[in-house]
Amino acid sequence: MDKQERKQKLKQWKEEQQQQGLRALPLPTEEMQKLFNSLRVELSFQACDHSRRLTIAWLKSKGQDVDKVCQWLDENGGYCDCEILFNSQEHFENLRPID
């Protein structure tokens, strides 16, 4: 296998990993972004109390499956509202298409 073939295989593998990650999201990408945006706004007015209070309130207000989303957050370092912005959002951003 030459260098070009290896590059193509690596690119294909990365795209497959990205698609798997997107399929594993507990909410559509637009809703995930809305959650992160809401947290960013709320945390600019109040400090994180080391819980998911704001996240859970947002999810309930939108009729979302809290347990399903919290499981994904656990798997991606989002154990409280501020960690959701620092860790989980970073993981989410890394799933976006590579140009």
Image (spheres, helix red, strand yellow):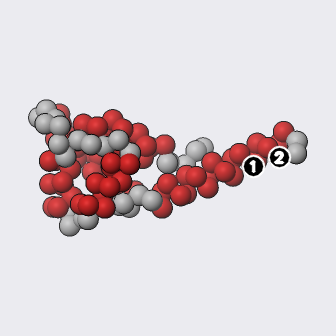
Label 1 near label 2: C-beta < 8 Å? yes
Is residue 60 or residue 78 the one in the foreground?
A: 78
> Can you see residue 8?
yes
Say which amino acid is labelled 2.
Answer: Glu
Say which amino acid is labelled 1.
Answer: Lys
**Furthest-right residue in view?**
2
| 20 shown above or below 77 | below
Is residue 30 or residue 88 the one in the foreground?
A: 88
Quarter of the figure with the C terminus: top right
Is residue 59 or residue 97 the one in the foreground?
A: 59
Q: Tally the numbered discs.
A: 2
Point out residue 81 in the picture as x, y percentages from the top left corner: 22, 41
At 28% from the left and 37% from the top, the residue drawn is 83
At mark 2, the secondary structure is helix
At 24% from the left and 37% from the top, the residue drawn is 82
Residue 5, which numbered label?
2
Determine whether, in the image, residue 33 is placed left or right of residue 39: right
Within 10 Å of disc 2 (Cα), the crowding (few <14, some 14-19, many 20+) is few
Q: Quadrant of the rendered structure where residue 68 is?
A: bottom left
Determine whether, in the image, residue 93 is placed left or right of residue 46: right
Within 10 Å of disc 1 (Cα), the crowding (few <14, some 14-19, many 20+) is few
Point out residue 14 in the picture as x, y percentages from the top left corner: 63, 48
> Can you see residue 45?
no
